[in-house]
Structures are given as structure tokens and as C-alpha cells.
Image: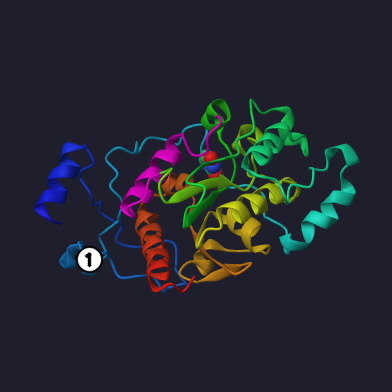
């Protein structure tokens, strides 16, 4: 690391920058196409596989907080077919309005007023999205946690602090070059994984957000987000390092920050995924 950068990170309380990895990585990576470590990574340590990646002294390593979502039930195959199918199972009053032509203000109003599924019943407020509305990068998470539900902004709890560090490592910050949204806009009770039907009902909102932002690259954070974006069953370990596409927009899949808080040894893999995404961006392959 360059001395100036080291000094800045030290000053910001973000050191130590690197973490030791376990000798044996329990999670095989069949994707295996990840980038080499970033330029400033010390080669000796990288060769030893000991770099975990993000500036993280600011990230609590303590037990996960209550707003950290836990793995939930499996997502049914072929999500793409769900919106139409689900709509027929929902009472008419529960179907979300046609949002495909709304501008930002009308869209956010529609999200806040939505009663399209049972998640609306326990929310404090819906959480539309945040950031640069003409950003090249768009990150998509799973759904609001307790803190997001309280504040009305995505990723403001512990997972959000890690996401901010991930963005900073890419030279991004919320509101500048990146837009952040969730697959579902209302907090699932007890932070459970949103159900396929809930994601399907909420999908038109995400579709419209993507259409308005027109990002060059979408980053799916975790399995529900990946499945919402790609409309099919996804296993993160197998999908990492691959370029997917959604309506002509490149999609990259990585771990959810809340998962990384519980499994810090995988932060290095997430950093590899972000480097892969950055290379796609730089190559204009999006
Ligand atoms: N986890 C998510 O997926 N989204 C948030 O906004 C917060 C935590």
C-alpha cells in the first residue's frame, strides 16, 4: 500500500486493512474466475491467499445484530414467471399499480403507499432506494432491516456500513456513482428472507428503478437479489465471477454484506467479485 493511502486510512481509523484468512476455505468457488488482487495488494500476502480485502476496522465483528437477515427458505425456480402467476393469486386490491411509466416522485409515492403484499402490514415505512439517479453502478439488496425500516433508507444498519466500505473500495459512495435499492421495499418480519411471492409483487418497482437509473452494471447482493434480477434459481458460489445480463444490462452476483458479517473470511471473495465488476465496467463490456 502506498504510504499516503496508509496514512489516510490510519487517520480515518480504518486500519488494519487486511485480515488473515483461514488456512482452509470451507466454501468452494466453482466460479473460480475472479480477478487477481488489486494493484496495491502486497504480492507476498496475496500469493499466500491471506488478503481479505475491505477496509474494515470500522465494521463491528461482534455477533450479528437483529437487523442482519438470516438465510431463509429456498427460492422457487423460474422467478421470471412469477409476477403474472402471483398476481392471479392475490386479491385485486393487493396488486401494485402499473408503475412502468412513473417518474421518480410518482414511483416513490407508489412504493410508500403500496399495500401489494402482507409486508406492508408490519412496516414502519417502505424503503424505496437511495443514491445517484443516473449512476453507472446499481447495487440491489434483499430487503430493509430494522434500521432501514426506521430511517426509510436502504443499507443503513451494520450491513450497510460494510456496503459503504465495499463501495469506498471501488471509489464510490452512496449518492455518487451508485444507486442502491432492494428486491423488496418493506421489511420482512424478523428479518426473514423475503418470499418469492413478495419479491414478485415488488418486482415492478425494482424494474422501474432500473429503467429510470439506466445503470451500466447491476450488482446483486445475495441470492434473493440475484434471483429477483435474473428471474431464476441462483447459487452464489456458482454464479460468482460470471457476467449475467438483464434486459441488456450486465449483472454481477456477490455475497450479501450481512452474510459477510457472519462469514468474514468470505470478504476476500466479495472483493474479487467487485474487482470483476470493475473490470467489466472498465472494459465497457456492459
Ligand atoms: N439488507 C438488505 O438487503 N437491504 C437493506 O437495505 C439492509 C439490509
Where 95 sits versus 234, above or below?
A: above
Asked whether 181 falls inside the magenta stretch, the response is no
Q: Residue at x 55, y 26 (%)?
A: 150
Residue 56 appears in view = yes
Residue 224 appears in view = no
Asked if the beta carbon under badge 1 is closer than 8 A to the nearest atom of ligand 1, the reply is no
Residue nearer the viewer, 285 or 142: 285
Q: Position of residue 279 (x, y in %)?
A: 38, 69
Q: Residue at x 72, y 60 (%)?
A: 79
Give the labeled residue for mark 1.
39
Residue nearer the viewer, 214 or 264: 214
Q: Quadrant of residue 48?
A: bottom left
Q: Position of residue 36 (x, y in %)?
A: 30, 70
Q: Residue at x 63, y 63 (%)?
A: 230
Residue nearer the viewer, 64 or 164: 164
Magenta span of residues: 152-173
Which colouring convention does the figure follow?
A: rainbow
Label total for image: 1
Where 115 sits versus 194, above or below?
A: above
Q: Position of residue 38 (x, y in %)?
A: 26, 64
Q: Position of residue 166 (x, y in %)?
A: 37, 50
Q: Secondary structure at mark 1?
A: loop
Q: Is residue 25 left or right of residue 78?
A: left
Q: Is residue 90 left or right of residue 29?
A: right
Asked whether 159 falls inside the magenta stretch, the response is yes
Where 213 sits versus 114, above or below?
A: below
Where 110 sits versus 222, above or below?
A: above
Q: Is residue 217 left or right of residue 183?
A: left
Amino acid at each position: 500500500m502506498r504510504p499516503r493511502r496508509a496514512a489516510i486510512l490510519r487517520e480515518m481509523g480504518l486500519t488494519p486493512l487486511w485480515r488473515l484468512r483461514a488456512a482452509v476455505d470451507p466454501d468452494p468457488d466453482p466460479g473460480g474466475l475472479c480477478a487477481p488482487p488489486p494493484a496495491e495488494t502486497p504480492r507476498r500476502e496475496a500469493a499466500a491467499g491471506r488478503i481479505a480485502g475491505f477496509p474494515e476496522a470500522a465494521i463491528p465483528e461482534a455477533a450479528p445484530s437483529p437487523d442482519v437477515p438470516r438465510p431463509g427458505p429456498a427460492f422457487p425456480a423460474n422467478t421470471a414467471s412469477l409476477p403474472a402467476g402471483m398476481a392471479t393469486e392475490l386479491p385485486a386490491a393487493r396488486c401494485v399499480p402499473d408503475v412502468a411509466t412513473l417518474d421518480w416522485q410518482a414511483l416513490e409515492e407508489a412504493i410508500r403507499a403500496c399495500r401489494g403484499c402482507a409486508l406492508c402490514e408490519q412496516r414502519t415505512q417502505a424503503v424505496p432506494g437511495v443514491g445517484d439517479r443516473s449512476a453507472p453502478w446499481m447495487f440491489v439488496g434483499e430487503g430493509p432491516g430494522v434500521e432501514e425500516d426506521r430511517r426509510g433508507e436502504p443499507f443503513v444498519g451494520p450491513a450497510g456500513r460494510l456496503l459503504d466500505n465495499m463501495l469506498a473500495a471501488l471509489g464510490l459512495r452512496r449518492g455518487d456513482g451508485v444507486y442502491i435499492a432492494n428486491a423488496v421495499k418493506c421489511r420482512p418480519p424478523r428479518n426473514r428472507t423475503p418470499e418469492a411471492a413478495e419479491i414478485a409483487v415488488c418486482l415492478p418497482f425494482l424494474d422501474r428503478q432500473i429503467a429510470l437509473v439506466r445503470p451500466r452494471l447491476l450488482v446483486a447482493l445475495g441470492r434473493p437479489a440475484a434471483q429477483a434480477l435474473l428471474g431464476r434459481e441462483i447459487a452464489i458460489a456458482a454464479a460468482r465471477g460470471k457476467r449475467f445480463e438483464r434486459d441488456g444490462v450486465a449483472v454481477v452476483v456477490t455475497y450479501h454484506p450481512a452474510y459477510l458479517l457472519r462469514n468474514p473470511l468470505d470478504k476476500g471473495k466479495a472483493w474479487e467479485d467487485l474487482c470483476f465488476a470493475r473490470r467489466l465496467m472498465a472494459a465497457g463490456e456492459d
